[in-house]
Image: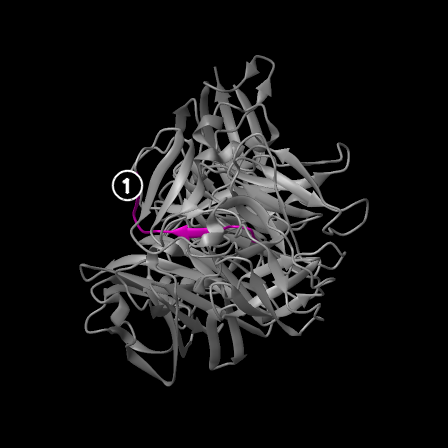
Amino acid sequence: MARLTINQTNFTAGELSPRMLGRVDIARYQNGAEIIQNAWPLVHGGCTRRDGTLYAATTKFPAKRSRLIPYVFNKSQAYMCEFGDLYVRIFYPDGTYTGVELVSPYTEAMLSTIDYVQGADTMFIFNTQVPINRLRRIADLQWSLAPAPFVTKPFDEKGISFTTSATISDVTVGTGRTFTSSVSAFLAADVGREIWSGGGIAKITAVVSATVATVQVITVFPVTPMTAWSIKGSPQTTLTPSAVGTVGGIISLTLGAAGWRSDDVGKFVKVNSGLVEIQSVSSTTVVSGIVRGAITSAVASPANAWSVEGSVWNDIDGYPSTGTLHEQRLAAAGSPNYPQTIWESRTGEYLNFELGTKDDDAMSFTVSSDQINPITHMAQIKALIALTYGGEFSLTGGVEKPITPTNIQVKNQSVYGCNNVKPVRIGNELYFVQRAGRKLRAMAYKYDSDAYGAPDMSVLSEHATETGIIDMAYQQEPESILFLVRTDGVIATLTVDRDQDVVGWARQITDGQFESVASIPTATGEQMWVIVRRTVNGVQTRYVERFTSGIRVDCGISATSGPGASVWSGLAHLEGKTVDIVADGVVMQQQVVTAGQVTIPRNAFVVQIGLPFKTQIKTLTPEVQGNAGSAQGNSMRIAEVTLRFLQTTGCEINGQPVAFRNLGSQALDKPPVLFTGDHRMENLGWDRGQASLVIEQNQPLPFHLLCVIKKMTFND
């Protein structure tokens, strides 16, 4: 019979996967737990009861989903934005609603695919269905949300797109086919241009009327009639500028045949090494425009030597899905029809995407690979990073040089792919959720291989994220914790400090389902906010709440009364719910909220009232190597256990209460003295093949477990 003292000094490996319960041979088994629920492993080694949440507000539309997005100008001017179905509401850091509500173009269905980046007091918001919007704070109660007023958007020779019906007399390859549009579509200068629809291509050989053209079918059209089609290229005729024109001047552009259309206003014409933005259309042959790039000559330019180009950000091609700020440029990427294209603004001019070849000009380039990889997110660590559905790419200039229109290197670093969850940077690593939503990877530059690696941070605790991740945010202080919202409403937390080799997972559960998470800085660190779906009085509703240090209930209130009070109101949001009550530091009997209030037996000056939650830690069966080999599978008895606590009161071990408090005439109705030190318990019994402890904190009281010391007996 072997007698040993085993000390589990820390929980820095967090909650290990059930798949890992046989891996008693690895170091993380000794530092892990089978369950860590409603507690946080700490970098220092111990485990502490998680913070509770304070109620801030009910979402505007409780029956609809909403999303939290932080707006941070500096550490003293930070706000939380509630994005919902076609609205945005602004909150102060203390949870107070500012009263500011903005009209938003984002529907409930778009919220999960919104991306954003903020520079100073301007936030750019991206979604493929809506032009890039700009959220700005002018003053605390003055905000604006509107399409960003770009000086110039990226443009290309796109031709003209139609969403009206059209037919063709014969879809097969051949000449003399008749193409008929349901609306006026053709002009004389369209002869020589191509019609595209659904893979079919036809060249226009003659224009019969505004609605009828004769075409040569080059590639078979899959269907007729067609509902979407386009005329590619530029008008096939000469173009003559009225003057050479300097930048900012107004000139006219004349075609040799009818080719201008009313919707050409706002498009750009490249001619004779210059650039002209069309301001007005005088006729089908003459337009006026402002010179954006100096024209070198006023001579006529033949067909195909000039071009008319339109913005690639539009309702038909879609808008960028993501963006970031990099090297004083606004980078945008991932529109539906240009899924692998990245656009970068002029240096220092976020609203100017006029393409050029000078080092500070705007630019566009395509992330090329052997498969279609739509860009999902843009971010930066050591380099500009493009995260796509199928892989991760780094974008750099030359050696120690910035990216320029003539100097760009794109390298495929890995092929994991990512989902819609916005990546989070922690130190020098970029944390992103793999495309299936079940793995968390940390991308970082590796000096030994001169490449970027992205190891799986959830490999030993894959169960923590197995239902899928839909949102995440990072708290740097007071504890380094990454919050990940799962599809089932549980928050998986990752305590992470790579320098200390701490990667500790845990699960945070509440009476409801977490749906969104975000963080903003405060004077003492980052404050985590959540949107929680709860069922109250039989009705499903959604609340904006914030994790707050010192609060040990959920969806709670923290209230004070100078003269003291026994009736406490402000609880209408918890009508009919059973709540925990802490009055002047003393835990009172649970009560049911009635008419938005509760009544306690005596007057109190300070209370916390909210939903209860239970902290639970279940230790793993220890591994001991002896002369006969492993102790696994043997009869085990924990003869004595010593728990080392810090500032703790109220706890159970295997269902047995831990007596922290000494009763006496001076102890009643006073807060319990917090205990720091070792607490010993005996006679916990035998068990065949396992010797785990279940340590629970069921009360809204402080709990901080430092280590677990077991005196054990093993029998064959």
- Expressed as whole percent of the image width and height from the top left, the position of residue 71 reads 52, 67
- Expressed as whole percent of the image width and height from the top left, the position of residue 129 reads 41, 55
Please say if 24 is above or below 273: above
In this orientation, which residue lies closer to the viewer: 238 or 382?
A: 238
Q: Residue furthest top?
A: 628
Please say if 517 is above or below 606: above
Q: Picture quarter containing residue 500?
A: top right
The residue located at (52%, 32%) in the rendering is 460
The residue located at (46%, 71%) in the rendering is 145
Please say if 662 is above or below 13: below
Please say if 360 is above or below 247: above
Instruction: Determine whether, in the image, residue 513 is placed left or right of residue 712.
Output: left
- Expressed as whole percent of the image width and height from the top left, the position of residue 414 reads 61, 33
Instruction: Determine whether, in the image, residue 94 is placed left or right of residue 228.
Output: right
The residue located at (80%, 50%) in the rendering is 401
Q: Which residues are magenta?
A: 156-168
The disc labelled 1 sits on which kind of residue? Pro
Q: How many marks?
A: 1
The colour style of the image is one colour
In this orientation, which residue lies closer to the viewer: 559 or 398?
A: 398
In this orientation, which residue lies closer to the viewer: 331 or 194?
A: 194
Reply yes or no: does residue 159 show up in magenta: yes
Q: Which residue is mark 1?
A: 225
For mark 1, give the secondary structure.
loop
Reply yes or no: does residue 199 show up in magenta: no
Q: Residue furthest bottom?
A: 563
- Answer yes or no: is residue 411 visible: yes
- Answer yes or no: is residue 612 visible: no
- Expressed as whole percent of the image width and height from the top left, the position of residue 533 reads 31, 57
The residue located at (50%, 81%) in the rendering is 140
